[in-house]
Image: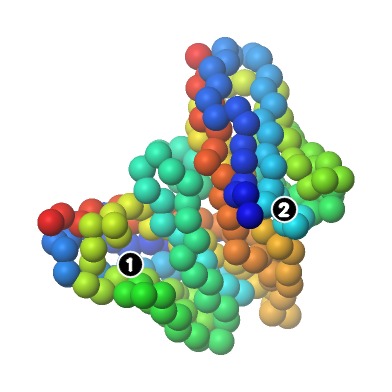
Amino acid sequence: QQPVQSPQAVILREGEDAVINCSSSKALYSVHWYRQKHGEAPVFLMILLKGGEQKGHDKISASFNEKKQQSSLYLTASQLSYSGTYFCGTEGAHAGGTSYGKLTFGQGTILTVHP
Amino acid sequence: KAGVTQTPRYLIKTRGQQVTLSCSPISGHRSVSWYQQTPGQGLQFLFEYFSETQRNKGNFPGRFSGRQFSNSRSEMNVSTLELGDSALYLCASSLPGQGTETQYFGPGTRLLVL
């Protein structure tokens, strides 16, 4: 089942912050975040594994709440280069905790950063 | 390392025809996944191949099929094309792990069905 991303779109000015949420109705093994610029392939940002970890990459970080089956992507002090569509990909977990082995992507969040 | 390559990049077909798309993974990657991307449906998982075997499959009709060769290169075939098959087809390669490892996407093949 497809995870739900919110908001669907967000418009920022350079330097502003944004949060993109990803929510699943099923138990998760991991959450993957990708960014896709118009006309280009999705580019990997980070993976978060079950265990409630948080990761950061430059001014982009993410958290994963395994119990709530939710992940959030935090973009701080946004730059023009952050513009694009952000996708979360969720990897389901079996009852025993093992992975389903495939990613299901959300609909995407369109992020636009203006000067 | 060279990235994931896909050929052709653009394709125009008519309804009823069939099409074969090709994907060459990053050297050393043995898992290849295929996705269909459309404005309305987003990124939809088609199937994943590892060591020449289909390991996972999405919810697509049997007209969509794939295979993987011993060198990890993969092909995807769509038979009896329909207008709704117009989409960007992306393949992604990864190193196999316990779960789904980082997926490295190719530039995609844009298919237009007339």
Q: Which residue does the image show at 58% across and 55% down from the upper left? A: B104
Q: Position of residue B33 (x, y in %)?
A: 67, 49
**A61 or A93: which is nearer to us?**
A61
With respect to residue B112, does A52 lie above or below? Answer: below
Quarter of the rendering occupied by the N terminus of chain A: bottom right
Q: Is residue A100 visible?
A: no
With respect to residue B65, does A12 lie above or below? Answer: below
Q: Determine the CA span between mark 1 and mark 2.
A: 33 Å
With respect to residue B18, does A9 lie above or below? Answer: below
Q: Quadrant of residue B15?
A: top right
- Color scheme of the displayed model: rainbow
Quarter of the rendering occupied by the C terminus of chain A: bottom left
Q: Residue furthest front?
A: B1
A60 left or right of B67 in image: left
Give the number of the disc on residue A4.
Answer: none
Q: Nearer the viewer, mark 1 or mark 2?
A: 2
Q: Which residue does the image show at 75% across and 57% down from the upper left? A: B28
Q: Please state which amino acid type lies under the numbered disc 1.
A: Ile
Give the number of the disc on residue B27.
Answer: 2
The secondary element bearing badge 2 is classed as loop
Q: Chain of mark 2?
A: B
- Tag 1 residue: A20
Q: Position of residue A105 (x, y in %)?
A: 51, 56
